[in-house]
Image (spheres, rainbow, N blue to C red):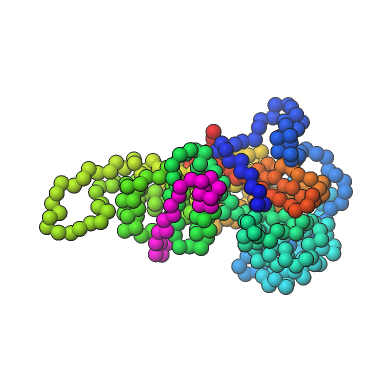
Amino acid sequence: MPPAEVFAVTAPGATVEPDTGNGDKQAALRQADTGARFVNESMPPSGTPVRIGLLLPLRSDTLGAAAESLRAGFMAGLERDRDNITVTVVETGDVPQDILGAYVRALQSEDIVVGPLSRTAVAAVAGSALVSKPTIALNTPEGHGQQGATPLPPQMLAIGLSIEEEARQAAQWAAADQPGGSALVLTTSSAWQRRVAAAFANQWEGRLGRPLRIVELSAPDGYLSDPELVQLRARLRQDTPAVLFSAMGADQTRQLRIALGSVLTTEPDNPIFSTADKLPPPPAVPTEQFASLPIYGTSALNPGAGAGFPGRDLEGVRLLDLPWQVQRDHPAVMVYPRPLQSGVGSADMARLYALGIDAFRVAREIARHPAGRFQLDGVTGKLTVDFGQGPASFERIEQSAIYQNGAPAPARP
């Protein structure tokens, strides 16, 4: 995200406006509101040949599968909207010099380069002074968009999926839903969870000025510590927040939800074992007091339909995710083939497939209009792109969702 961020999560579940026959008028109104041209998917082909180089680490042992999912999505986009476009897949490994060499070769023969994929590779290209043609990076360098970070070259646009950005949008959504009160952020010592927790905290406390506490739970072997969950419930009895934000994954958030919804008897805050402990116990805490606390999270709470996850334990939990994952009736989602994916990690591969589709659509639009600001209702979210007019900027607003009947569904206003 660029330093000046604009968040549009004011009403969960915002959907595409229905076609009333006044499409041109509605598009003009949207452009007037945002200063961006809304992409017209029904435009005839431009007729101008465009060469795109797709730079992916297909030879990498660690990123090869991810690169293949993204390649498949990009080619699905090409199959639907060729528009006189040819795509050359440029395979690389993990070594920065290999990637830079492949990037230089792509610049010599292609009009637009899409890639690379990893953060380190994007950082290597961004810092190389080689970026002389439109380059659509599929990730962002560490710290990109934060105050004091080195800006990307003007010809580079970073459109990678960002779980930290989801956390910031979740903070905006939660603040709109709960106008008063504090937030409690729950995380473990995992590095990615700490980044997610920090992103939510910076938005909630730093930008919105709302009170917040962060609690880091132990998770030996991936399971939350039972004694610490007991202590958490005791803390919630003393100071109940307006919002819980889970920076954790689906399974740990499920453990948390079960612990908060279980029968709470009378765990003392500081138990003392002595013969004097025969006083009448205090009244039990109603289960609903904690079970009804609104919980927000990121796409990490959605492992996908093919993972066999018991989603009913997360009923009512709110999250941000891609339309590709939670909104099957989205106009763009419906027109692309959906690969058969199942098992652990399948949801992440599906998200990369969706990123490939939108990467093609963004590249095609930049090929049509090399300079300007445009909006695209993509399969990864509502995209706003500013390119060719100085430093490039990119924004993605993801779909808000809520667990209903065991699966995330788009949240409706």
Please tell me which residue is depicted at 72% across the width and 66% down the height of the picture: 127
Give the farthest residue toward the right. 48
Q: Quadrant of residue 272?
A: bottom left
Q: Position of residue 326 (x, y in %)?
A: 56, 44
Q: Does residue 243 appear in the picture of this structure?
A: yes
Q: Position of residue 270 (x, y in %)?
A: 25, 56
Query: Which is more toward the observer, 188 or 114?
Result: 188
16 is higher (above) or lower (below) than 107: above
350 left or right, relative to 241: right
Q: Does residue 360 appear in the picture of this structure?
A: no
Query: Which is more toward the observer, 60 or 11?
Result: 11
Please tell me which residue is depicted at 72% across the width and 69% down the height of the picture: 99
Q: What are the residue bounds of the magenta stretch? A: 201-222
107 left or right, relative to 233: right
42 is higher (above) or lower (below) than 82: above
233 left or right, relative to 274: right
Across the whole image, how many numbered discs are drawn on residues? 0
Q: Residue 90 colored magenta?
A: no
278 left or right, relative to 79: left
Q: Residue 216 colored magenta?
A: yes
Q: Position of residue 138 (x, y in %)?
A: 68, 57
- Work out which quarter of the rendered image holds the C terminus and state it: top right
Q: Position of residue 45 (x, y in %)?
A: 83, 43
Please tell me which residue is depicted at 65% across the width and 43% down the height of the picture: 382
Query: Which is more toward the observer, 319 or 350?
Result: 319
Please tell me which residue is depicted at 25% across the width and 47% down the height of the picture: 265
Query: Which is more toward the observer, 168 or 239?
Result: 239
